[in-house]
Amino acid sequence: MRIGDFKESYAADEALFRTPTARAGLAALLAALALFPLVAGEYLVYLANLVGVLAIGALGLNILTGYTGQISLGHAAFMGIGSYAAAVAQTRFGAPFWIAVPAGGLAACAAGAVVGVPSLRIKGLYLAIATLAAQVIFEWIFTNWTGVTGGIRGINVAPASLLGFRFDTDVRTYYLVTAVAALHAYAAANLFRTRIGRAFVAVRDRDLSAELMGVNLFRTKILAFMISSWYAGIAGGLFVYFAKVVTPESFPLTLSIQYLAMIIVGGLGTIQGTLYGTVFVTLVPEALRSLTQVAQKISPEAMSWFHPMKDILFGAMIVGFLVFEPHGLAEIANRIRRFFALWPFPK
Amino acid sequence: MELLLQLVLSGVVTGGIYALIAIGFVVVYKATRVINFATGELMMFGAFFAWTAMTSAGAPFAAAVAAAALGAALVGAAVERVVLRPLMGQRTISVIMVTIGLSSVFRGIAQIVWSGEYRSFPPIFPRRPIHLGPVLLPSRQVYPFLLALAAIALLWLLFRFTRTGTAMRATADDQATAFGMGIDIRRMFSFSWMLAAVTAALAGIVIGTIGGISPQLGAVGLRIFPVVILGGLDSVGGALVGGMVMGVLENLAGGYLDPLLPGGGVKDVVPFAALVLILMIRPYGLFGTREIERL
């Protein structure tokens, strides 16, 4: 399918989507995304919104963990900071959403810069534990700084609006979320074709060699934390407009773990993998839910199995991918693509 | 003054239990360099094993503890063999995530087998509270604490005086040399996990006798991170000291700061704030091995 593909210029060789098939695939994907709410039901659109928001956050985590090699167990906390900053910007200062959401991103970015500081001295396991501590501390702040965060009751937020157009239904929010997610995925893919992005990868692969080649480790790691937190903050900001309310329970440690699961299932250090992983990790419990609802018609006790099975499935998914498919869904997709590279001609 | 004494003493009681949990964690880390996020869930399993032995089989407490230890050892060995061994020498994130995944699986299994309800152990210890000077300590804390201390002492004897214990220390110290001396490294890894699971099970029983058991019992497992970071990730003695210090610290913080802050919950966050400080100043902890690396 991809034979006879020769490049005649460097620009063509460096393009993000290099082959006609890839470009056609992208066009088909964009068309499918645009048409999706017209055919899908309300619930599916709601799920798509959730996937979109989480995908932005997962992209951020993959930039930090997958590409730069800095493990973070506190990604949900940054998303929370973005959410609260956006909610406060809107409710206290009356900022429109196109200011409130980036404000969330910037707030998370600033927090990321602070949390990133220990990464200079500690790495690996220790950094994972430090970010775990950040998660616990921020969660506590969300609950206890009642003057700003509203404590457990949280903050209610009005829907976003742009030039009089109100994003008040799920379908309308869908277009907003999808556009922002696509933009961020595009930016992330491009990031790794720049000096900064390559420096991230160099730091992951061997920090000492990176330093010797002139990469400023401190600046690079902090930058990775900031960019990653920006993504989380934007995800948080959008989440506010999608959920219409922000409470501390929305950003528990389990969400941080879920983010890590997404990038592991999808593939560490790949952009498309992140998207596959987000869809997979979000939709598997939903598939289980539908299955349980069917089973409930046969045996009324089935519903009590849903939560335990969800836990088991989630854990088994992480363990299974790590043991059997450590490069994630992206690698499976590549394998399929390689199979079709010469198709229908034999190798 | 009396409040201070009361807080310190109940802090020591909590700390003893933390120390026991942390030791199991450190044993695995020392031998295999794996951070075991499933420690809490292994505790929960141990507590449920003992509970089942006591309520269903009517076993006496000592027999139930032995049964729980045996069950936990089997779980530990299985985990090591099936999940951790294929991942040996893999990236840090894989090793971290695999134990997190396991903890989720364990929680799910526990909910199916024992349901999500709260259970409590049949009464085991005498109920009379214990007077220690001016301080009154509830018996349901003191006896479990003594139990934890006994378990720690037993572990110390095991490490110090048995052949297997010595081999495990040798493996943790220097794998290549230990291997050269004819020690079966893989078996030591397996033993470490079994021992960690047994320790966790004992800790789970101790906690279960104090506050009851449910599949959510494993949440306590997170509390060991400040403990092991303070003590040093690879130091058994450090786990003991770290446990005591963190137990006292969180009790003092809870006792004195909680009334000042409207939301409360200071107890849960202060150890983690301390954890961040320790990581900034002395990441290898009080007694951990110093890994020198300049960047």
Image: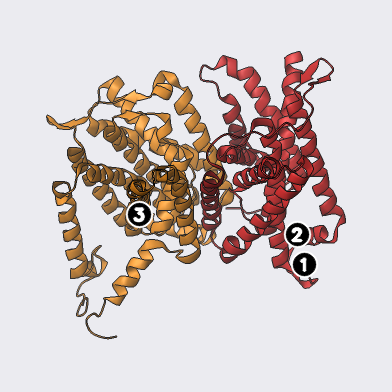
Is label 1 or label 3 in front? 3
- The residue drawn where x is 69% and y is 46% is B201
- The colour applied to the residues of chain B in this rendering is red
Q: Can residue A121 be seen in this view?
A: no
> Distance from label 3 to label 2 (Cα)?
42 Å
Counting from the top left corner in percent of width and height, residue A73 is at 49, 44
Within-10-Å neighbours for mark 3: few <14, some 14–19, many 20+ = some
Q: Mark 2: which secondary structure?
A: helix
Quadrant placement of the C terminus of chain A: bottom left
User: Which amino acid, mark 2?
Assistant: Asp
Label 3 secondary element: helix
User: Tag 1: residue type?
Assistant: Ala
Left or right: B148 in relation to B228: right
Q: Quick one: which chain is orange?
A: A
Instruction: Check disc 1 and report its element: helix, strand or loop.
Output: helix
Q: In this view, does A13 lie above or below A213?
A: below
The residue that label 1 is drawn on is: B178
Image location (x, y in percent) of residue B200: 68, 46
Label 2 vs label 1: CA separation?
A: 8 Å
Q: Find residue B279 and report its image quarter.
A: top right
Which residue corresponds to mark 2? Answer: B173
| Residue designated by label 3 | A280
Determine the residue positioned at 26% across, 76% down: A340
- What is the C-alpha distance between the residues marked 1 and 3? 44 Å
Q: What residue type is labelled 3?
A: Phe
Residue at point 80%, 48% (across, down)? B155
Q: Which numbered disc flags the more N-terminal residue, 2 or 1?
A: 2
Please, which chain is the residue tagged with disc 1 on? B
Between A102 and A31, which is closer to the camera in this rendering?
Answer: A31
On screen, residue A257 versus residue B275, left or right, reads left
Taking depth in this image into account, of B84 and A239 the one nearest to the observer is B84
